[in-house]
Image (cartoon, rainbow, N blue to C red):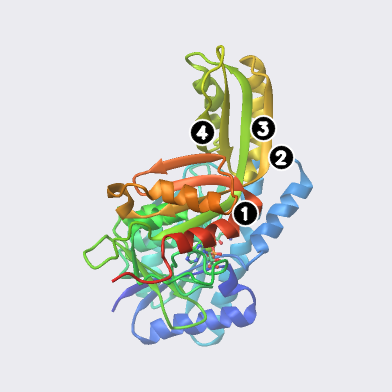
Amino acid sequence: MALVVQKFGGTSVADIDKIKNVAAKVIREKKAGNEVVVVLSAMSGETDKLIALAQKAADSPDAREYDALISTGEQITVTLLAIILNSMGYRAKSFLGFQVKFWTDTAHKKARILAVDTEVIKKELSMGTVVVVAGFQGVDKENNITTLGRGGSDTSAVALAAVLNADQCDIYTDVDGVYTTDPNICSKARRLDKISYDEMLEMAMTGAKVLQPRSVEMAKKYNVPVYVKSTFSDEGGTLVTKEDMDMEREIVSGITYDRDQAKITVTHVPDKPGIAAMLFTPLSQHNIIVDMIIQNASLEGFTDVTFTVSKKDLKDAQKIIQETAKTIDAKNVEVDDQVSKVSIIGVGMASHAGVAAKMFSALSAEGINIMMISTSEIKISCVIQRKYTELAVMVLHDTFGLEKKSS
Ligand code: ADP
Ligand code: ASP
Ligand code: MG
C-alpha cells in the first residue's frame, strides 16, 4: 500500500462537474489500494474575487482579517469534494489548515510553514478515510489564520508529502507537465519528462506559475519526488527530482516571464555609505521583497537607484520609499508599472561563455529595450516593457533552439 498526496489546482475544481472528475481520480487511487491525502485550491477566480472584496472594503485591509477572508475559497472546494466522495460510498473528511494544524509564522499573506501535525491525518488514514485538506492556509501560534502566498496550495501539498513521508506527490493542473516555457503563450513549447529541483526552482522563482517556488524549495529539502500532471488527461507528466545523468544538460533549458513586476527609481540619491541600507531596510521591515537593484555611476556625489518589486506591493513600497527619500534628501521617486521580467534558465549556462550576449542580441534584434539585467549561475533575467513579453519569450525560445530536443 502506498501513500499518495494528490493536489488539484483552481481550474481542476472550477465547478461541481470538475470536482466530480477529481473524485474519480481519488477513487482510482483508493481502488489501487493506496492511502490518499488530497489537497485542493479554491475554484479558479475565487481567490481573486475575495481579494477584490477586501480591497473594496478598505484601502489597506487589516492583514489578519484579510487572510481569514481569502482562505475561505478552499473551504468551499474541500467540503464539496468530501460531500461528493461520501455520497459515492467513500469515507472522506475535509480539514482546514487550523484543524490539521499547519503551523506557520505570523507573516500574513506570505506565511512560512514551520511544522505540520500528522496525528489527525494518520488516524483518519488508518480508518480508510480519504483526507481532504484545504491548501494555501495555516495557523500561527496566536491562533490566527494565515495564508502562504499566491499559488500556495502547491506548498501545502509538498509539505504534507514530506511530513507524511508519502510515496508520491502528484500536482494535477491544467497543463500536462512542465514545459520549456509557458505552453499557453508559446505554441512551440516542449514538455520535459524530468526536471531537476534547481532548474524548476529558478523557473518558478522567475515566474513559471506551474509550481509555487516554496513548494520546490521544500521538495528539494525533503527529497520529495513531485509529478506535475494534467487533471484532464492521463498523457504526459513531468517528474521534478534530483539531478541525474539522463537529464538533459542544456545550456538553456527554459524561458520564463513574470508580468507581476513594477520598477521604482529614486533619483539624485546622495552617494555615501549607508544609503542603500537606509533605502531598503524599511521595505524589508514591511515584508516587501525587492528583486533586482541597479545603481547608476555616481555623478558629483549623487546617483540614481532603481529596483523592482511585485506589482501588488507597489503602492506600499512607493509610500515607504517616498518617506525615506525625504529623510535622505533624494530628489524624486518615479514608478513604472508597465514592465515584465523575462529570464533564461539552464544549469549548463555556468560553463558556457556568450549566453548573455546571445540573449541581449536576440532581444535587440526585435527592438526590445533592456532596462535592467541580473544574472546568477543558472539564470539571466532582463526587465523589459510589458507589451513585449510574449514576443520576447517566443524569440528567446527560438534563439536557444528549445523546440527541438537535442540528442
Ligand atoms: P493551478 O491552478 O492548477 O495551480 P496554475 O495556473 O497555478 O495552475 O499553473 C499552471 C499554469 O502555469 C499553466 O496553465 C501555464 O499557463 C503556466 N505555466 C507557466 N510556465 C509554465 C511552464 N514552463 N510549464 C507549464 N506551465 C507553465
Ligand atoms: N487559491 C490560492 C490562489 O489562488 C492558492 C492556490 O491556488 O494555490 O493563489
Ligand atoms: Mg498554482
Left or right: 208 in relation to 337? left
On the picture, is 147 further left or further right than 157?
Answer: right
Q: CA distance from mark 2 to mark 3?
A: 14 Å
Residue 370, above or below 193? above
Foreground residue among 203 and 83: 203
Q: Amino acid at mark 3?
A: Gln
Between discs 1 and 4, the one toward the N terminus: 4
Mark 3 neighbour density, 10 Å: few (under 14) some (14–19) many (20 or more): some
Q: Report which residue position mark 1 lands on.
A: 388
Q: Nearest the camera: 95 or 381?
A: 381
| Rendered location of residue 375, percent (x, y) | 41, 42
Local secondary structure at mark 2: loop
Secondary structure category for the residue under label 3 = helix
Residue at coordinates 50% horizontally, 53% vertically from top-left?
Answer: 362
For label 3, the residue is: 318
Q: Is ligand 1 within 8 Å of the beta carbon of the residue shown at mark 1?
A: no
Task: Tell me which label, 2 or 4, sits earlier in the chain.
Answer: 2
Percent of width and height locating residue 151: 53, 58
Q: Position of residue 22 (x, y in %)?
A: 52, 79
